[in-house]
Image (spheres, rainbow, N blue to C red):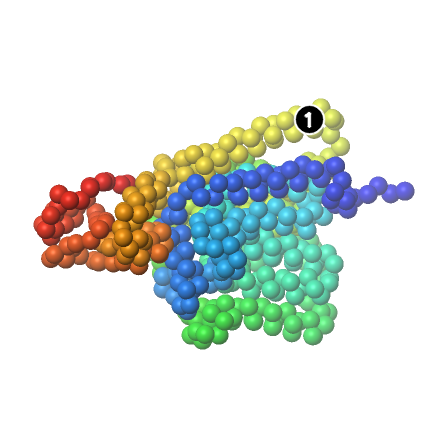
Amino acid sequence: MEPVHEAEEPLASPVWWPFWIAFGVALALRLLWPEIRPLHHDEGVNGWFLYRLLEGYRWDYDPERFHGPFLYFVGAPFVILLGMSETVLRLPVMLASSAMILLLLPLRRRLGRTGVTAAAWLLAVSPSLVYYGRDLIHETYLVALTLALVAVVSLWLETGRDGHLVLAALTLGLLLTVKETAALTLAGLAAGAVAAWWAAGRPPILERLRAVPVPTRRLAALVLAVWYVLLFTSFLTNPWGLVDSFRAFLPWTEKGIEGSGHEKPWPYFFLLLGRFEPMALAAGVLGGAVALWRRNPFGIFCCVWWLGQLAAYTVIPYKTPWLVLNILLPLILSAGVLFGEIGRKPLSGAVRAAIAGIGLLLVAWTASKAVQVSFLRYDDESLGLVYVQTTRELRDLMKMIEDAAARSPEGKPGLAIRFYTNNRWPLPWYLRDYRGTLYLKEVPYAASGDVLIFDPGQEPDVRAALKDWRKYQRRVFT
């Protein structure tokens, strides 16, 4: 009787328990206390768009200023079913980030059980993936769908099933609707695929594609096109959105080159990975070296992929910390290649115990960094992952406004709130039920209102415009 290949072992068997524990840890780190951190600037904008969409206003893709439609249309059903709140806004992102652990399972023939389990733990406790896996921004969707695409294409290469090819087309279509930088992702995947094709002895992949039945190819193309068109045209209500989806690459390329206020020095991502993801970085680099030495096609694919992403995002002046997720994902898969090779070695029990012990200590240290940045110091911008984050004092400001509304005879709808500042996000989302809110660019000649919000530098103008400054309570918020 031949031994069962470890990739074919039942997923419910005890040998897979470490993997399922990693999945549980991922769920806990992403789903616990999602409302502890106020929405930041970009989340406020995204939440406002989603709120307006559900209020009956059409959402139109704006290639000059904002990213793709996927985030809004995938989030809408959650809000419809569960109501509008910080937790519900972030819930689909948190689920997508957690589901990345499950998306490793189709890769178990390439990474082995040990490699898949190691990659699962790295994904589960990554400070970057946890922090941005609790954010209403596009990046988590981008990397989750990228991993889904890799997993489904891998299945198709293994099985040749038409259903897997159609599913890959669907995943690709959705990936393209998330964010314009999907083009960089596909370029990295393509470079890795070419390198893997060469390492595998240049198999006849084109002949395999030609062997796919014509109806299946047509169905795959249709599935890709339909979802791409539906989302970018806001379900056919904005036909110009399809044109804008192609026009978007010019303004976003210009932003990337110019920096648009987000310029960082070239070693930015090296430093970010070294500070928050040293285990993934070290194991990923070693995994790439092992893959090249062993001529492991999938390992070479991952190695070239993360090298390409690192090079691209290093060269581009525009740098924000969430972009590191695009480098981190292939690094973690490359680390899985390393641990997969270790798992196949006939090592003694003592050596395996030592490796497992060191690994657990490093995982615990990495998890502690994830807890620190996501639950304790989430608004401390001295931590490199924290960026454009609203401080926790927003809760105090909202409490003051809610108290004022409670004292007002007309309640929230009648409370007169006046903004005399451009730095207003994410407050419009929080004040969506306050119908008496006005956003003004300048302090008017005669200012009035129940609540006045302005920058400190505007205080002399506000004092001069008020008839009776003394009747107001003055508070300063960061």
Question: Looking at this view, is 353 or 11 the one in front?
Answer: 11
Q: Is residue 254 above or below residue 120?
A: below
Outermost residue on the top side: it is 350
What quarter of the picture does the C terminus occupy? top left
For badge 1, the amino acid type reads Ala
Label 1 environment density (alpha carbons within 10 Å; few <14, some 14–19, many ≥20): few
Left-right relation of 420 to 22:
left
Q: Is residue 27 above or below residue 362?
A: below
Q: Is residue 242 visible?
A: no
Q: Position of residue 51 (x, y in %)?
A: 41, 60
Q: Position of residue 422 (x, y in %)?
A: 25, 54
Q: Position of residue 284 (x, y in %)?
A: 57, 41
* Element at label 1: helix
What quarter of the picture does the N terminus occupy? top right
Q: Is residue 411 above or below residue 328?
A: below
Question: Looking at this view, is 15 or 234 the one in front?
Answer: 234
What count of labels does the image hold? 1
For image coordinates 35% across by 42% down, the residue present is: 395
Residue 399, quarter of the rendered image:
top left
Left-right relation of 392 to 88:
left
Q: Which residue is mark 1?
A: 353
Residue 201, quarter of the rendered image:
bottom right
For image coordinates 50% across by 67% down, the residue present is: 231
Q: Position of residue 154 (x, y in %)?
A: 67, 55
For image coordinates 58% across by 68% down, the residue present is: 224
Q: Is residue 472 above or below residue 168?
A: above
Outermost residue on the front side: it is 409
